[in-house]
Image (cartoon, rainbow, N blue to C red):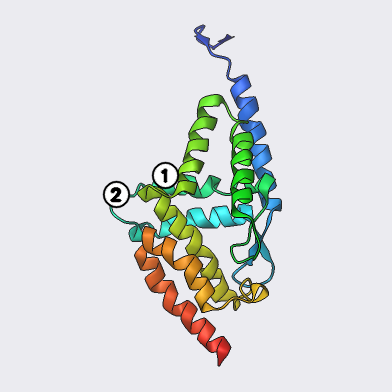
Amino acid sequence: MAISGAGAPTPDRTPDLDRQIAFLTEACKLRGIERASKLADGSRHENSGEHSWHLALFALVLEGEAPEGVDINRVIRMALIHDLVEIDAGDAPIFEAGLDQAEIEAAEAAAADRIFGMLPEAQGAALRALWGEFEAAETADARFAKALDRFQPPVLNLANGGASWTPFNVGYTQVEARLRPPMERGAPTLWGWVGPRIRAFFAGEAS
């Protein structure tokens, strides 16, 4: 036990702080994971740390598009941690063919166990559960977070001329199939805004 200045015994926080700082240092590696998406100006690929920050900002700014009952603070927390597993598992581009989804999910679950396990037990378990909730997308908070996670990349693509669609040789049909269902499930107005713009983009490409 440590002794405070007032003479009252206080718990020694050092072990918890050691684990929290180790986790935060590990989280820095997320900025080294390159995503398929490019920045809005097309100058380079974004990294997963930048994506997580941007997604949290989307949640903050687009709170008004959330269905009734969504806790935006929980959504922001999901956004900040949702891709930490990519430190171990890497990025899995949504339009890349031949990916084994079961293998990806297993790798990400193992990564979640390791990374959130670095924290003090109760804190790590809470964040691991929040990550699992996001992945399952069964609650209103998680469905909105998932909708935003599908909304952010096409917003960038529309700004940068489809820079991360072109390499995968996708068209409107493939993009709609992957993006529309989670958006309509979690935040229908988002697809209502971006869907026509995606269609117009690909129509322009074909003309």
Q: Residues within 10 Å of mark 2 (few under 14, many from 20)?
A: few
Measuring from the top left, give residue 192's x and y in whole percent.
37, 72
Identify the residue shown where x is 54% and y is 57%.
54
Q: Helix, strand, or loop for circle 2?
A: loop
Q: Which mark is residue 69?
A: 2
- Which amino acid lies under the numbered mark 1 shown in the image of this protein? Arg
Please state which of residues 149 and 136 is positioned toward the viewer in this rendering: 136
> CA separation, marks 1 and 2?
12 Å
Give the mark count.
2
1 or 2: tag closer to the N-terminus = 2
For the question of whether residue 58 can be seen, the reply is no
Q: Quadrant of residue 157?
A: bottom right
Q: Helix, strand, or loop for circle 1?
A: helix
Measuring from the top left, give residue 202's x and y in whole percent.
53, 83
Q: Quadrant of residue 121?
A: top right
Measuring from the top left, give residue 75's x and y in whole percent.
43, 48
Q: Which mark is residue 16?
A: none
- Would you say 74 lies left or right of 84 here? left
Please state which of residues 99 and 140 is positioned toward the viewer in this rendering: 99
Measuring from the top left, give residue 120's x and y in whole percent.
57, 26
Label pair 1/2, CB-CB below 8 angstroms: no
Identify the residue shown where x is 54% and y is 45%.
81
8 is higher (above) or lower (below) than 189: above
- Which amino acid lies under the numbered mark 2 shown in the image of this protein? Gly
Q: Residues within 10 Å of mark 1 (few under 14, many from 20)?
A: some
Identify the residue shown where x is 55% and y is 93%.
207
Please state which of residues 26 and 111 is positioned toward the viewer in this rendering: 111
- Would you say 156 lies left or right of 32 here? left
Identify the residue shown where x is 57% and y is 87%.
205
**Image quarter in which the N terminus is found:** top right
Q: Which mark is residue 74?
A: 1
For the question of whether residue 125 can be seen, the reply is yes
